[in-house]
């Protein structure tokens, strides 16, 4: 199998390289930003066949010069900053780029898998079902979510969900996210806070019905998320847009407790006010409906959150990568 992984030096993309290598797949073209991306620590010890800079890769696609021997494009490259407000920038990077790659794949009869996001569900007024009929009704809370929603809509409105595979990733955490700065998971940021200060800071709640730290998210460990991606890579006939979550929401307090337990410490949590630029776009509850995933035949059993956090803390202590 000859594979292209865009965003291959990023968090989920580089972890996917690890998974592909585990499966004996080494003919991989990594696409990412800048020529220096190939020197990323996330790519260390990964076996790949080539590295192509993002804009150069798009040029090959637009001019129909991309090697036709490619079997599949896994498009995980995007601007993943959930507080980015430049809608034009996001549309160019998260929608137009995706559409051009998808169109090339369709024209050349190549498989195309891409990253969507649970941020498309907005405040969750319609729940978290990934059934096709809900796609046009979703209302994301931020520009990032809107940019992902626009591409899902393009897939849906053109009837391409039977030809492409999309992944609505929920709150993914795990090794290889070290470079993400403010977009790192709470496990990553919290680990360093605890080591440096002995305590962990969480947002206060600004919504009736939710106590501080009791906001709930569907947290999924990167290794589990990759098992779902691999299921679809390994089953060529499975297509559509699917949730990638555990179907079990946990509170931030529960996640914090798991982190303290992994470090052998008693919980010490400090709550602070949510910044004004986040309040209006904050999701207080997310929980993936994975009935469609199960119906597709993916019966993977997710790792218990405490065990997953403990496993991740082992990587954090060593600052090691998958």
Image: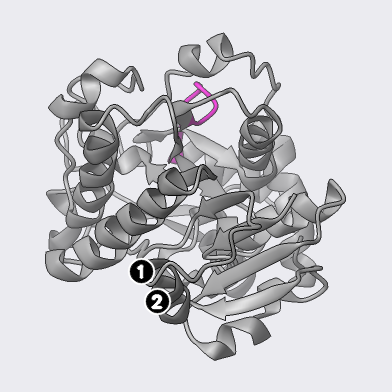
Colouring style? one colour
Local SS, label 2: helix
Dot label at residue 204: none
Image position, residue 103 (x, y; %): 36, 50
Foreground pick, 208 / 22: 22
Q: Quadrant of residue 49?
A: bottom right
Instruction: Name which residue lies at 30% across and 20% down.
Output: 132
Image position, residue 181 (x, y; %): 45, 73
CB contact under 8 Å: marks 2 and 1: yes
User: Visible in this render: residue 9?
Assistant: no
Q: Quadrant of residue 236?
A: top right
Dot label at residue 59: 2
Left or right: 67 in relation to 160: right
Left or right: 289 in relation to 90: right
Foreground pick, 142 / 251: 142
Instruction: Name which residue lies at 26% across and 60% down.
Output: 96
> Is residue 74 within the magenta segment?
no
| Above or below: residue 129 compared with residue 276 | above
| Magenta region | 244-252
Image position, residue 131 (x, y; %): 33, 17
Q: Around disc 1, counting alpha carbons within 10 Å, would you say few (fewer than 14), some (14 to 19), or many (20 or more)? A: some
Give the quadrant of the C terminus.
Answer: bottom right
Instruction: Name which residue lies at 63% across and 56% down.
Output: 70
Foreground pick, 143 / 16: 16
Q: Gap between marks 2 and 1, in whole Å?
A: 5 Å
Q: Around disc 2, counting alpha carbons within 10 Å, would you say few (fewer than 14), some (14 to 19), or many (20 or more)? A: few
Image position, residue 83 (x, y; %): 24, 63
Foreground pick, 238 / 167: 238
Left or right: 145 in relation to 314: left
Q: What residue is pinned by disc 1?
A: 62
């Amino acid at each position: 199998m000859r594979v292209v992984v865009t965003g291959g030096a990023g968090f989920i993309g580089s972890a996917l390289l690890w998974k592909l290598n585990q499966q004996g797949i080494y003919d991989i073209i990594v696409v990412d930003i800048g020529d220096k991306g190939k020197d990323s620590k996330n790519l260390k010890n990964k076996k790949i066949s080539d590295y192509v800079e993002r804009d150069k890769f798009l040029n090959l696609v637009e001019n129909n010069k991309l090697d036709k021997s490619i079997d599949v494009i896994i498009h995980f490259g995007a601007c993943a900053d959930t507080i980015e407000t430049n809608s034009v920038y996001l549309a160019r990077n998260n929608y137009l780029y995706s559409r051009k790659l998808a169109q090339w794949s369709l024209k050349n009869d190549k498989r195309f898998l891409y990253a969507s996001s649970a941020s498309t569900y907005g405040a969750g007024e319609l729940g978290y079902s990934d059934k096709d009929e809900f796609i046009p009704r979703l209302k994301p809370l931020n520009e990032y979510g809107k940019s992902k929603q626009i591409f899902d809509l393009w897939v849906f409105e053109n009837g391409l969900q039977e030809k492409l595979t999309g992944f609505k990733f929920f709150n993914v955490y795990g090794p290889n996210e070290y470079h993400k700065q403010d977009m790192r998971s709470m496990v990553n940021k919290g680990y360093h806070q605890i080591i440096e200060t002995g305590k962990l800071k969480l947002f206060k709640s600004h919504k009736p019905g939710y106590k501080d730290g009791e906001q709930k998210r569907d947290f999924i460990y990167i290794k589990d998320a990759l098992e779902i991606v691999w299921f679809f890579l390994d089953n060529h006939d499975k297509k559509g847009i699917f949730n990638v979550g555990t179907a079990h929401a946990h509170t931030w307090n529960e996640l914090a407790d798991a982190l303290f337990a992994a470090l052998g410490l008693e919980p010490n949590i400090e709550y602070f006010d949510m910044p004004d630029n986040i309040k209006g776009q904050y999701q207080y509850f997310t929980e993936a409906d994975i009935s469609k995933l199960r119906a597709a035949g993916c019966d993977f059993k997710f790792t218990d959150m405490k065990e997953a956090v403990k496993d991740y803390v082992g990587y954090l202590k060593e600052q090691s990568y998958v």
